[in-house]
Image (tube, rainbow, N blue to C red):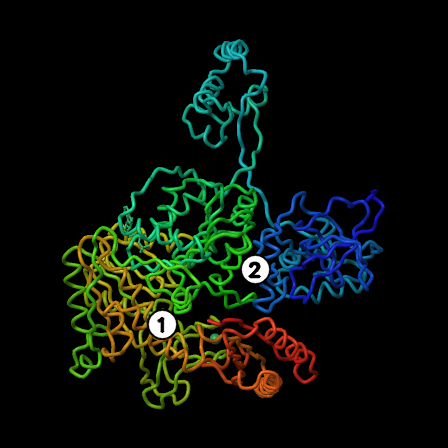
């Protein structure tokens, strides 16, 4: 069959929230060169260019006049078939578009951006008399440089708003706008020096030596340094050569000029580590039997839950499973919450697997991410350690997915769509690859434990800490009592403060946990009760002392702290509540000898700041670590004698159906940081309500009771895991419109699903970033057909979107909300 003259069409996924794929025509010159998974450049809309992913090549013309594909970007597909299958599932399950999945799934470096550039208009007559000085400046700059980006225009004009000037010049036909497509990924190069082929033989080389010895001694020295350092490879980095004290830059230049040495650029990896595998760990008997249990589980179930107390050595068990997979030529994905991805853990895994370890998370830049992506695309066995987005790498033969700290809420993406849960999605990815999934946690999610109990997942436990270390003693300090007796020292009960002092005196370290950053979560006027709020969100502003600022933790709005009340003008203002910053400061005043570090969002913004804080604590440079939930995740320190939880009440009182489960998990996890080696550690929980049921579960290390209690509640109020939830959020700038719209939408949904629809209701924070918010909750039985329900919802939503009254409202759909 002669394909050259046939007409082909290509369905592509565009990186936009379009409801379906879009069809383009293939120029005949490209016949036979386009395959599924390649990136192609297409025009969409008036003039915008995009890189799109080829989904299907076929011969059916669409109903509209298809535009031509502009260019093919890749010789080989960058998205593999299994990924497209996964994207498909994600978009259907989470009720979003494939374009939205594509945006999340592809590293930004693989998406092209269309960039507007300004050039001279072809029909410009050359008459500049009518231009003012500013316009003349710009036109001359364009004439000299050809084209300018908007940013460059802004620099030339020395002002931010350049559009009025540009618009006028376009109207006058002096300049015009070009759309230029730009590849964002740029390979990295380094200069290398190599011996020219002609001098490979010893005779030639000796002749060169003789000549140089007489006339150019510096060059001889440089050449000798090269031969010595480059070894057999006879090629080395220019920078390494010049770092040698016998080598000289100008002598090197002469050697290159004479053609004895060659100098050129070589593409290098940004991500390759030179780690070598060294360690072969021996498992304890507990670990061995857990490993066997896991394998038994995998014999007839694709998912197994490993329920092992903190420091039971789960990581070692994982490494055994990973090794098996790599030896069978398989790929492994090891998923972790973002901030648990520390050098500590990565170092441990590199000791086992050397350069087969690939790392993927948000601290990597665009370029590094593309390199990891391309590495996985090579189909070689590897173990990817990453945060939730590493689900989207181009795996070809996954054998195992491990999800450590599987209970962690950060596996759920909140915004933007797809609002996916990496734990649930991983199960699908595993299914596509016929791989197994291992969920690991000391405090499993109620969902996963339920599935294990009901035989959907296999189950393995480790109830003891590795090496005979014992679980910590847990005490509760009564804040109410201490307050009544006026014994509180700032935010510390006398008992906690005394123990911190003692533990530090014994040369051990302390971790203090408070799930709130900043200094104080609100400022209250003692005269009229007024509290400063964010101008865009319905929350009080948090006081940050070091920055001397009030900040909104939702939108980032900042303002100067008031000296007098905005409402009544009196000056009797009081800071209420406390965050990590305050704990750090007050402890410093009470125990001046303590070396305190703080770990929260505010102190870990830099690329290496988290690493440095951990390294300093590990080496003993600091001995108290104050932090938010960041300190609860997967850290392994050997010398922590005491963990303090400053305010259990603040964690327990969060208004959400999962709050007790979360509170248990947080407190148990942070407690788990204490006494991980020989000596028993100690935990002190401060609370106004020491007898609280959940606190007692933590004290008694009693997961089971927490679980049964939760399950009974969830049953009574129809919550997961017994029911499924879908939340629809209606947002808009006009409160009344949000009210009316959400009411209309809920009643439409009710006509199909009756009492399964709850709301609309305002959430706790009813306005964010200047938008009012109302939620509608859909609760369905676990057994109900999810596909049918989602179809019904989609139909109702589609009608709503085109309803003339509600065009200004935005809808957010969250399947299995957190
Ligand atoms: P978990 O992930 O369950 O909290 P870890 O895997 O961090 O526990 O193990 C706790 C500590 O015990 C670590 O310091 C780890 O190096 C050590 N450990 C665990 N298993 C072994 C083993 N088989 N051999 C040597 N050390 C081990
Ligand atoms: Zn705000």
**Residue drawn at x 53%, y 46% as measured from the top left:** 376
Relative side of 377 to 164, left or right: left
Q: Is residue 78 above or below residue 747?
A: above
Whether disc 1's CB lies below 8 Å from ligand 1 is answered: no
Towards the viewer: 107 or 554: 107
Towards the viewer: 727 or 737: 727
Residue tagged 2: 104
Tell me, for residue 661, which label it has, or none.
1
Give the alpha-carbon distance from disc 2 to disc 1, as whole Å. 29 Å
Q: Residue 204: x and y, percent?
A: 55, 11
Residue 137 appears in the picture as rendered: no
Occupied quadrant, residue 49: bottom right
Relative side of 266 to 36, left or right: left
Q: Residue 58: x and y, percent?
A: 76, 53
**Residue drawn at x 64%, y 49% as measured from the top left:** 183
Q: Earlier in the sequence, mark 2 or mark 1?
A: 2
Which element type, helix, strand or loop, lies under badge 2? Answer: helix
Q: Residue 412: x and y, percent?
A: 47, 65
Towards the viewer: 73 or 320: 320
Tell me the crowding category of disc 2: few under 14, some 14 to 19, or many 20 or more residues within 10 angstroms, Cα based. some
């Amino acid at each position: 069959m002669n394909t050259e003259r046939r007409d082909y069409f290509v369905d592509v996924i565009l990186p936009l929230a379009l409801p379906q794929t879009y069809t383009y025509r293939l120029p005949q010159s490209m016949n036979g060169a386009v395959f599924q998974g390649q990136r192609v450049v297409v025009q969409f809309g008036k003039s915008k260019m995009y890189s799109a992913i080829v989904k299907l090549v076929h011969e059916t013309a669409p109903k509209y006049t298809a535009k031509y594909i502009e260019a093919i970007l890749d010789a080989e597909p960058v998205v593999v078939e299994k990924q497209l299958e996964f994207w498909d599932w994600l978009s259907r399950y989470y009720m979003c578009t494939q374009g939205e999945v594509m945006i999340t799934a592809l590293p930004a470096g693989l998406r092209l951006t269309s960039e507007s550039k300004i050039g001279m208009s072809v029909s410009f007559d050359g008459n500049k008399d009518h231009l003012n000085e500013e316009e003349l400046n710009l036109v001359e700059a364009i004439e000299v440089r050809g084209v300018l980006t908007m940013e460059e225009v802004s620099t030339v004009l020395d002002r931010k708003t350049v559009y009025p000037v540009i618009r006028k010049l376009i109207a006058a036909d002096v300049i015009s706008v070009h759309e230029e497509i730009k590849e964002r990924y740029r390979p990295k190069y380094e200069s290398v020096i190599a011996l020219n082929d002609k001098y490979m033989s010893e005779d030639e080389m000796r002749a060169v030596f003789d000549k140089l010895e007489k006339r150019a001694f510096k060059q001889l020295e440089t050449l000798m340094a090269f031969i010595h350092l480059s070894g057999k490879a006879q090629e080395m980095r220019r920078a390494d050569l010049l770092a040698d004290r016998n080598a000289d830059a100008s002598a090197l230049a002469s050697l290159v000029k004479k053609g004895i040495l060659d100098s050129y650029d070589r593409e290098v990896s940004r991500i390759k580590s030179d780690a070598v595998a060294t360690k072969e760990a021996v498992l304890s008997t507990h670990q061995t039997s857990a490993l066997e249990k896991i394998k038994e589980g995998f014999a007839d179930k694709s998912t197994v839950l490993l329920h092992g107390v903190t420091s039971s050595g789960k990581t070692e068990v994982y490494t055994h499973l990973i090794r098996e997979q790599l030896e069978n030529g398989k790929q492994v994905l090891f998923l972790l919450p973002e901030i648990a991805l520390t050098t500590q853990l990565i170092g441990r895994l590199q000791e086992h697997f050397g350069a087969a370890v690939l790392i993927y998370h948000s601290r990597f830049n665009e370029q590094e991410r593309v390199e990891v992506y391309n590495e996985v695309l090579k189909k070689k066995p590897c173990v990817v350690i990453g945060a939730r987005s590493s689900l989207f790498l181009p795996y070809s033969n996954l054998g195992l997915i491990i999800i450590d700290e599987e209970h962690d809420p950060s596996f759920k993406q909140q915004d933007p769509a797809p609002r996916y849960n990496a734990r649930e999605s991983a199960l699908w990815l595993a299914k596509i690859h016929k791989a197994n999934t291992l969920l690991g946690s000391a405090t499993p999610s109620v969902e996963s434990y339920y599935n294990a109990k009901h035989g959907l997942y296999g189950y393995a436990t480790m109830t003891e800490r590795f090496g005979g270390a014992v679980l910590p003693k847990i005490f509760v300090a009564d804040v109410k009592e201490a307050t009544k007796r006026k014994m509180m020292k700032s935010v510390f009960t006398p008992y906690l403060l005394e123990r911190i002092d003692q533990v530090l005196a014994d040369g051990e370290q302390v971790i203090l946990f408070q799930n709130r950053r900043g200094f104080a979560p609100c400022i209250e006027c003692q005269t009229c009760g007024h509290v400063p709020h964010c101008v865009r969100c319905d929350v009080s502003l948090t006081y940050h002392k070091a920055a001397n600022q009030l900040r909104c933790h939702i939108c980032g709005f900042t303002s100067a702290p008031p000296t007098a009340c905005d409402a009544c003008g009196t000056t009797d203002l009081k800071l209420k509540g406390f965050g990590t910053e305050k704990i750090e400061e007050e402890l410093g005043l009470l125990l001046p000898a303590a070396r305190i570090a703080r770990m929260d969002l505010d102190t870990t913004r830099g690329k290496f700041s988290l690493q440095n804080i951990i390294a300093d604590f590990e080496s003993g440079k600091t001995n108290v670590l104050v932090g938010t939930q960041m300190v609860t995740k997967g850290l392994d320190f050997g010398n922590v004698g005491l963990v303090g939880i400053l305010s259990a009440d603040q964690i327990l009182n969060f208004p959400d159906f999962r709050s007790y489960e979360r509170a248990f998990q947080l407190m148990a996890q942070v407690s788990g940081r204490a006494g991980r080696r020989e000596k028993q550690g100690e935990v002190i929980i401060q609370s106004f309500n020491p007898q609280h049921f959940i606190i007692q579960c933590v004290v008694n290390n009693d997961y089971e009771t927490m679980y049964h209690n939760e399950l009974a509640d969830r049953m009574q109020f129809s919550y997961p895991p017994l029911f499924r939830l879908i939340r629809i959020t209606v947002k808009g700038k006009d409160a009344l419109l949000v009210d009316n719209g959400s009411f209309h939408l809920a009643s439409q949904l009710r006509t199909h699903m009756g009492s399964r629809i709850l709301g609309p209701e305002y959430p706790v924070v009813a306005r964010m970033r200047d938008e009012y918010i109302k939620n509608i909750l859909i609760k369905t039985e676990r057994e109900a057909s999810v596909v049918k329900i989602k179809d019904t919802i989609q139909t109702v939503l589609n009608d709503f979107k085109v309803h003339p009254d509600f065009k200004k409202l935005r809808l957010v759909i969250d399947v299995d909300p957190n």
